[in-house]
């Protein structure tokens, strides 16, 4: 099965523009997410039915972290939050994007053939 990919333009808290690149291998339920120079591999991917959340796992040092990607469509401008955590470690990144980019990402996630949360 082919890997599905998407690029979404986001802005960080300082207003700098970055490309968020997400790729998912549906059959293996794994993929990658990268924002600018930051990239992590994800396993055990699942998604919400509405396409506003995707969850997976990543390895940080020797610890397995749960990674949650949440799209907040109610904020103005809408934002995407990427959180990796397992006590005591929490890494959180928040970016804003346009409604057009938000809609594109939500529809892409909804179309993924991975298990529902």
Image: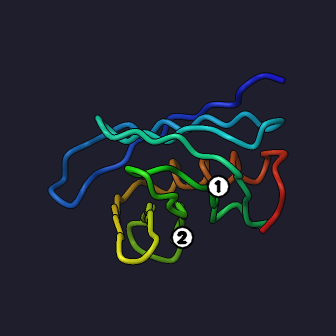
Which residue is at a point 75% across and 43% down the rendered structure image?
A: 29
Mark 2 Cα shell of 10 Å, populated few (<14), some (14-19), many (≥20): some
Tell me if residue 23 comes above or below residue 15 in the rendering: above
Element at label 2: loop
Which residue is at a point 52% across and 60% down the rendered structure image?
A: 67
Tell me if residue 53 comes above or below residue 29 in the rendering: below
Coloured how? rainbow
In this figure, which residue is indicated by the disc labeled 1? 106
Q: Position of residue 80 (x, y in %)?
A: 45, 61
Element at label 1: helix
In this figure, which residue is indicated by the disc labeled 2? 73
Whole-angstrom CA distance, mark 1 to mark 2, is 9 Å
Camera-nearest residue between 29 and 111: 29
Camera-nearest residue between 65 and 24: 65
Mark 1 Cα shell of 10 Å, populated few (<14), some (14-19), many (≥20): some
Where, quadrant-wise, is the C terminus in this rendering? bottom right
Which residue is at a point 50% across and 61% down the rendered structure image?
A: 65
């Amino acid at each position: 099965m082919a890997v599905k990919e998407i690029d979404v333009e986001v802005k960080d808290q300082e207003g700098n523009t970055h490309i968020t690149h997400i790729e998912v291998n549906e059959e293996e339920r794994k993929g990658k997410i990268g924002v600018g120079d930051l990239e992590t591999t994800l396993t055990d991917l699942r998604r919400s039915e509405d396409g506003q959340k995707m969850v997976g796992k990543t390895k940080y040092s020797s610890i397995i972290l749960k990674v949650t990607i949440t799209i907040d469509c109610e904020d103005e401008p809408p934002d995407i939050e990427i959180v990796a955590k397992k006590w005591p470690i929490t890494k959180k990144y928040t970016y804003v994007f346009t409604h057009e980019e938000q809609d594109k990402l939500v529809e892409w996630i909804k179309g993924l053939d991975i298990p529902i949360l």
